[in-house]
Amino acid sequence: MNQITMHQMKQFKNEITRFMMIYKFALDAIETKIEILKEEFQFLHEYNPIEHTKSRLKSPESILKKLYRKGCELSFSSIRENIKDIAGLRITCSFISDIYLIRDMLKKQTDLTIIEEKDYIKRPKPNGYQSLHLLVLVPVFMSDGEERVCIEIQIRTIAMDFWASLEHKIYYKYNQAVPSRLLEELKEAASSASALDRQMERLHKEIEVLKEEQADFAERHRIIINNQEFDLPPALLGLLDGSMDKPKE
């Protein structure tokens, strides 16, 4: 009897380990994709929309607690069906436009399937929370076949992440009703963070326009001869301008 019990326990532990490993491998795969995008922007573009990333994997205890709260059946298939945030990745960006740029890049990855999108930026939560949430199916190839694993991806700006992190710390292990006055202040703080995002986005766009104009000006005041670049001296430019203005005889 003890031998059967030990065998069952070992088999069950193997199943749990395999179950958790699949989610870890899916997280590794999506992080590799994000790292490739970061390196591409670093080497081929002048601007990188990804500031940093952070991943997390729920513990078996946290998974069971959430399953019990939902009142769901205790089985691996039930966990897969009802808990979509076992593995999570948070991507932090500089600007709001970066969020949608990264989302669009992920959509172009043919092996990924976005099964749900929640835009809490266009429609913030009642407490002021803002972020873009994606549920993404990631293929994981194990020795006995392919598994499609659900990963939750949150994409937010630095300001949004700052607010959400502090809001979590304020509420951490606080199980009582929060006074309405504090809720209103937190919502006002979220509005301030959103206003800062919009202002920084506008400044970013204006600077980009100025950079393009400056690059265009430099291009027009430079010549290339035999693969060598030469700046045109201001005096020569003045002479050219004068000759261009001089009427032809």
Image (cartoon, rainbow, N blue to C red):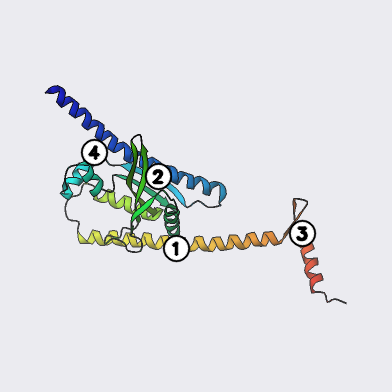
Q: Which residue is mark 4?
A: 60
Q: Is residue 8 above or below residue 84?
A: above
Please, what secondary structure does the residue beneath circle 3 have?
Answer: loop
Position of the N terminus, as image quadrant, is top left
Q: Nearer the viewer, residue 208 or 30?
A: 30
The residue identified by callout 2 is 30
Which of the numbered marks, if any, corresponds to residue 199?
Answer: 1
Number of residues whose C-alpha sits closer than 10 Å to that of mark 3, classed few (under 14), some (14–19) or many (20 or more) = few
Three-letter code for the amino acid on which mark 1 is drawn: Gln
Q: Position of residue 41 (x, y in %)?
A: 52, 49
Q: What is the three-letter code of the residue carrying label 2?
A: Ile
176 on left or right of 246 = left
Q: Position of residue 214 (x, y in %)?
A: 63, 61
Circle nearer the N terminus (4, 1): 4
Q: Position of residue 232 (x, y in %)?
A: 76, 59
Q: Which residue is mark 3?
A: 233
Q: Is residue 207 left or right of residue 200?
A: right
Q: Nearer the viewer, mark 3 or mark 2?
A: 2
